[in-house]
Amino acid sequence: MRMPAKAVLLTATLCLSGVVAIPANAAAAASPESICGSGYARITGGTQPVKTSSGRKYGTVYLLYNRSNGYNCVVTIKSSFVGTRTPVSAELTIMAKPIKDTKQDPIVRREKGNFKSYAGPVKYWAQGRCVKFWGTIKPLGHDPAVASGGRQKWDNCG
């Protein structure tokens, strides 16, 4: 039995719209562990919301650590505007010396750009050194509401 032309068109439209939605959903489902790679695990205090000053949450910034190689990893994952390229950043700051020496300039590693789902991974060796981490997400257009979050004090000195 032959399907009417409208039914064929509706079926094709539904199939195509499902195919288009899969990549955006798959990107949104990425975990910080899968982005950073094998051996990385979230650390205590390493999951922070990325919010505007009015409290709107646009995503989450994560700090992970790999005990086997001494590297930290930072990823900022969007929960708003997923699938649309918007300005996103992930930043890792490492104390230059293992001891809390404020006279040394810290090492800063950052990824920023227009991304559909996340910025990062930003990785750097920091065994025995203290770190800070930060992430930002900005919507497109004239909305000045930049969301930010992370930790701006030295910690995870291990």
Image (spheres, rainbow, N blue to C red):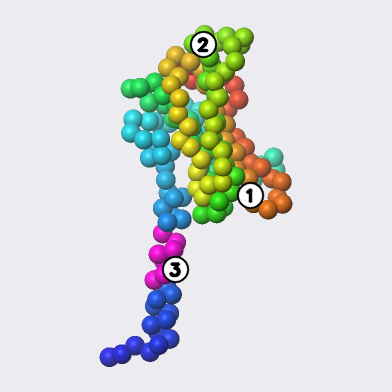
Q: Give above or below for 85 relative to 136.
A: below
Three-letter code for the amino acid on which mark 2 is drawn: Lys
In the image, taking residue 2 as reference, residue 105 lies left or right, namely: right
**In contact (CB < 8 Å): disc 1 and disc 3:** no
Q: Upstream in the sequence, badge 1 or badge 2?
A: 2
Q: Upstream in the sequence, badge 3 or badge 2?
A: 3
Mark 1 lies on a secondary structure that is loop
Could you tell me how far apart the alpha carbons at marks 3 and 2 are, in whole angstroms? 53 Å
Report crowding for label 1: few under 14, some 14 to 19, many 20 or more residues within 10 A (C-alpha): some
Mark 2 lies on a secondary structure that is loop
Three-letter code for the amino acid on which mark 1 is drawn: Pro
- Give percent across and percent down for residue 158: 44, 16
In the image, taking residue 94 as reference, residue 158 lies left or right, namely: left
Pointer 3 residue: 17
Pointer 1 residue: 139
Pointer 2 residue: 97
Could you tell me how far apart the alpha carbons at marks 1 and 2 are, in whole angstroms? 37 Å
- Bounds of the magenta segment: 15-22
Query: Do we see residue 76 in this rendering?
Result: yes
Could you tell me how far apart the alpha carbons at marks 1 and 3 are, in whole angstroms? 25 Å
* Secondary structure mainly formed by the magenta segment: helix
Report crowding for label 3: few under 14, some 14 to 19, many 20 or more residues within 10 A (C-alpha): few
**In contact (CB < 8 Å): disc 1 and disc 2:** no
- Give percent across and percent down for residue 92: 53, 27
In the image, taking residue 113 as reference, residue 157 lies left or right, namely: left
Q: Residue at x 46, y 55 (%)?
A: 24
Q: Residue at x 40, y 76 (%)?
A: 12
